[in-house]
Amino acid sequence: MTALTLSTSSAATLRADALVVGVAKGPKGPVVAPGAEAVDKAFDGKLASVLETLGAAGGEGEVTKLPAPSGVKAPVVLAVGLGDAPAKGDGFDGEALRRAAGSAARALAGTKKGAFALPVESAADVAAIAEGALLGAYAFNAYRNGSAKNGKDDKSAPLAEVAILGGKPRDKAYKAVADRAIALAEEINRARDLINTPSNDLTPKSFAAAAQAAGKEHGLTVEVLDEKALAKGGYGGLTGVGQGSANPPRLVKIAYTHAKAKKTVALVGKGITYDSGGISLKPAGHNETMKCDMSGAAAVFAAVVTAARLGLQVNVTGWLALAENMPSGTATRPGDVLTMYSGKTVEVLNTDAEGRLVLADAITRASEEKPDAIVDVATLTGAMVVALGDRTFGIMANDDAFRASLHEIAGEVGEQSWPLPLPAELLKGMDSPVADLANVGGRMGGGLAAGLFLQEFVGEGIAWAHLDIAGPAFHESAPYGYTHKGGTGASVRTLVRLAERTAAGDLG
Ligand code: BES
Ligand code: MN
Ligand code: ZN
């Protein structure tokens, strides 16, 4: 794991392999951002014009490497674009800092120590830079053996050490945000590892084992129901989805409790370790990335462990609904009727709408413990990706204020989300001629229908929200900011902030 330190050294004298400075897009060309004064001085005050000559404009994510002038100890200066310069008197937006730090950290993969001299006005700025740098300093090399034939070193390690300048290491607030950023980024990177691990190695059983190991490490209670316990317990959704696979299903409860907690938040994650679609098989072109279908469970897992590492004064219970959706002679068929854990019956008209089946059981089970709120997180529908694109998750809820809070929290931590409705008439589309409910309705509003289906399993009087992260969970195009190709860890920051706000009594 990448090490993080706050440093009081001057940008010019700190020993590092590269010195990161910020450059913003001004009305008349690039502008050197605060924090880099000493470096600019070593360039005789001409850093902005040097950058302009090299074609830099200060746009978001732009990276320019320069040999350091004499007077700067680091051999390389890396100027990273921050995007538009803020209006006079305003500081840089946290997400701009987070992304710039991430772009710089990615560009420094393979080097040892990067010193970040980005604009810092507050502890929150240090938090954003730390998060961005630690999330940018990530690589998934578990399956590379370094023998690529293309002549490239295909196993370059992430940046090993991050030093942030301009913070106040002896100030409690700064120290606290640095520690928080380390815990958060390590757990997000752990979620990314789980998502990136191929389905031949990450099965419901091995995922449950990972939860058990983390539980031991961080003093959490972990309970695992295996396929026998699930069948015996009447978990028809988990059993029905998992029964076609040689890798049987699991329901994992991973709970963090605080002796003085006043509230309990339950987080429920969709953990389909591979989604082939089942008998309603997905066509080629739609199944290559379906190892990512456990991203919700990975996010929940990461959030619970982070809450524990931060010692938050709130109980956070994670429910990981783990199954592999495969076609076989034992698989659920379209037309089969499942009796869910709640007792409701569901006619499975499309075995590819499996996420709502495993989540329904987990939501009913979570409701039995009467938490103050339930948030489920799932790569649930392609319709959500069509609606919101691949960087924004949708938020649905049975409580307007709770939905608004989650949207606000996501914005605060730099995650893109949007509130969506649950139009009651779409539930009628899921009427079944034989069962209480069908698992699919019409094509229109598919993401909302999935939310309505889940709502049927939420316990009476419990505030519930559903995050459909199908778009942002797995990144396929060019990396940007702190986002790499593959698993992103989307929603973890939102879940952790929700836990923090609940602990502080800022929510309901
Ligand atoms: N796991 C998929 C949804 C998904 C799609 C996640 C793209 C990530 C990227 C889900 O299980 C699924 O197959 N949903 C179906 C539902 C349909 C059959 C009602 C879909 O969206 O097509
Ligand atoms: Mn599916
Ligand atoms: Zn799925």
Image (cartoon, grey):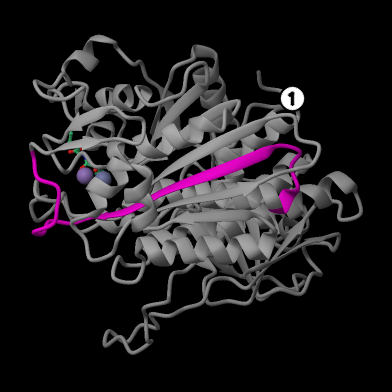
Q: Tell me residue 115's x, y (percent).
A: 70, 65
Is 463 magenta? The answer is no
Q: Amino acid at mark 1?
A: Gly
Using the image as rendered, state which of residue 162 and residue 24 is in the foreground.
162
Query: Can you see residue 279?
Result: yes
Determine whether, in the image, residue 273 is placed left or right of residue 217: left
Is 317 magenta? The answer is yes
Read off the magenta span.
309-334
Q: Quadrant of ligand 1?
A: top left
Using the image as rendered, state which of residue 220 and residue 426 is in the foreground.
220
Q: Residue at x 64, y 36 (%)?
A: 499
Element assignment for label 1: loop
Q: Residue at x 26, y 36 (%)?
A: 381
From this view, report whether residue 235 is shown above or below residue 371.
below
Q: Tell me residue 269's x, y (percent).
A: 43, 44
Residue at mark 1: 505
Using the image as rendered, state which of residue 370 and residue 464 is in the foreground.
370
From this view, report whether residue 263 is shown above or below residue 148.
above
